Amino acid sequence: MIKNRKYAAFVAVVLVLFIQPATQAFAQNTSGTLDVSTPLDESSMFGEQNQLVTVIDAATAAQGVQLVEDTKTYPVFLLEGDVSAGLGGSVSDSSTLGLFGAVNLSDLSFTFTPQKDMDFNLTMSGTFMPSTDSGLSIAAQDLDVTGYADIRTSEFTRFYASASYTYNTSDSGSIYETSDGFSLDELFLDTAINRKVFFRLGKQKVSWGVGYWYKPADVLSLAAVDPDDPTADREGPFAFKTDMPFGKLNHATLYVVPPTTDSDGNLSGVSAAERTDIVVGGFELSIAGFARSDMEVKPRLMFMFSGAIGDFDIYGENVLAYGSDRIYVRKTGTGSYETYRVENTPIFQSTIGTKYSWENSDGLGVDLQVQGYYNGMGYSDSTVLFAEAAKKAVYEERYGATSKTVTSSMDSIDLQSPGMFYLAGSASVSDRFGEGSGIVNTDLSCYALFNFSDGSKRLKPDFSLTIGSGGSKLDLELSALTALGEAGSEYAPKGNKVTPALSATIMNVTTVTFGAPIYLNDDYSFKKSSYEFSLYWDILKLEK
């Protein structure tokens, strides 16, 4: 039930049906004949037992090239990944050398396809070593288990479920804390009506916005963008999605998110988000709106664009919200902290970015990208959040739980992107020379992020070298993730820290790693450090 009637009209306007065309999702038409206008999707290349599947694209067919036959039978079992054994260890200023033997699993994956359009997968990565607990013989570190089931009963009817489990994850240096435990990533059902209206119901990943590091228009994702891995998948809501294509390239999408309950049994509001995408010339333009009945997340209008001007790709997002979702905090004259909100006021967010890529026939390439972001929901001076007492005041106002410990993690909605002015950029130069077994690939890159509202910075130079096809002789990578700023800042939550890292794989068999997190004082003088190292050799390498 909508509590505030003045926004009922807005919600009603938002409820419009539309969908993104599912072009090239399937290469066969309803009559069962092969459509050679587009290449077949890999998943549709599986045939029934003893069924012949022919794969050819239109351009090849026009040249009169003989068709290539590919026969597949069921069931299909695939086992992939690497298993290695070796030594690992660590040492710090306050501890003695720790050395242990271990077995490492790297993307060990089992896929089972019992029949056409039905796939099940389980993938595991992690390190197993002797346990220091007398009650257990083996302990796990950085254990990551993922699995999915993908069942397609017809061309556009699909059931999909995926889940993951993480355990004993070591400090990765990310500004977001990783919690152990089970996570239901996606669970949804797809269906369609007459190839014109498409539906998805269930928990699903949703990523709006065209930005890279900053996406103010991404109102449906439940997790913030990781600045060290902007393209990583993020958790999405349980929602009902309706898609409707129109014209050749245009489409419209509607999401309705039903109410959920918190740990205290309180029911949230109903959310609705609508987006229409149209192609004009070489640009894709998107107009969107969002509203939630309880106003915990403020209504907003969004405009996004992406396209090319000459050799440059440009993109941008603009968001106009009626109030801020954030609970703010400020210091009082008595030295304590008080919270407040900004409501019934238009608030603007905007980001714009550009990308440039160039490569010659000799293998020399250059990639550049820069993105700026104005966050009207942030603090012009977000250093107020350096104090744990300030974070605690916001936490208690939001959740009302005074007994819980408040950390400097940026997981809370009130602490995410706390600044108002941001800039990010990346640059890379790659080169390739030689041929055959002696081919050499090099890549020198760096990304940097700046929060001008709290003075924190984050950058990572990286150099990689591969010798031989696929690094068959040597695969080397050197990097140094660097965070500069005061403790409690966004990009340097633990203060000044530099983490040099080395990884080298020799002959695709032996892998050596070394990392040395170095903590610095405010004047950048040495504070403390620790060292981690490992040596593993492959005992089992499985490929398709």
Image (tube, rainbow, N blue to C red):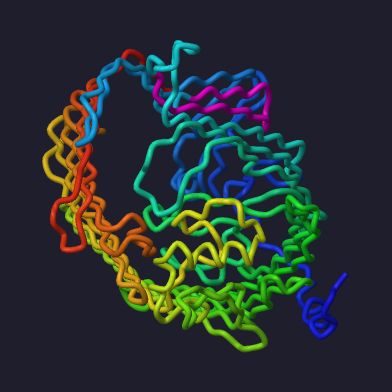
- Against 196, is 466 above or below? above
Q: Quadrant of residue 447?
A: bottom left
Q: Residue at x 70, y 63 (%)?
A: 19
The stretch drawn in magenta includes residue 124? yes
Q: Residue at x 63, y 70 (%)?
A: 250
Q: Quadrant of residue 126?
A: top left
Q: Quadrant of residue 213?
A: bottom left
The stretch drawn in magenta includes residue 72? no
Which secondary structure is most common in the magenta stretch? strand
Q: Position of residue 177 (x, y in %)?
A: 46, 48
Q: Position of residue 527 (x, y in %)?
A: 18, 50
* In the displayed structure image, the side of residue 185 where residue 230 appears, left or right: left
The image quadrant where one finds the N terminus is: bottom right
Q: Residue at x 41, y 24 (%)?
A: 81
| Residue ranking furthest to the bottom | 345
Q: Nearer the viewer, residue 26 or 464?
A: 464
Q: Position of residue 380 (x, y in %)?
A: 42, 81
Number of labels in the image equals 0
| Residue ranking furthest to the front | 334
- Against 287, is 109 above or below? above
* In the displayed structure image, the side of residue 82 where residue 190 appears, left or right: right
The image quadrant where one finds the C terminus is: top left
- Against 338, is 203 above or below? above
Q: Nearer the viewer, residue 316 or 84?
A: 84
Q: Nearer the viewer, residue 151 or 132?
A: 132
Residue range (magenta): 109-128
Q: Residue at x 57, y 42 (%)?
A: 41
- Residue 471 appears in view: no
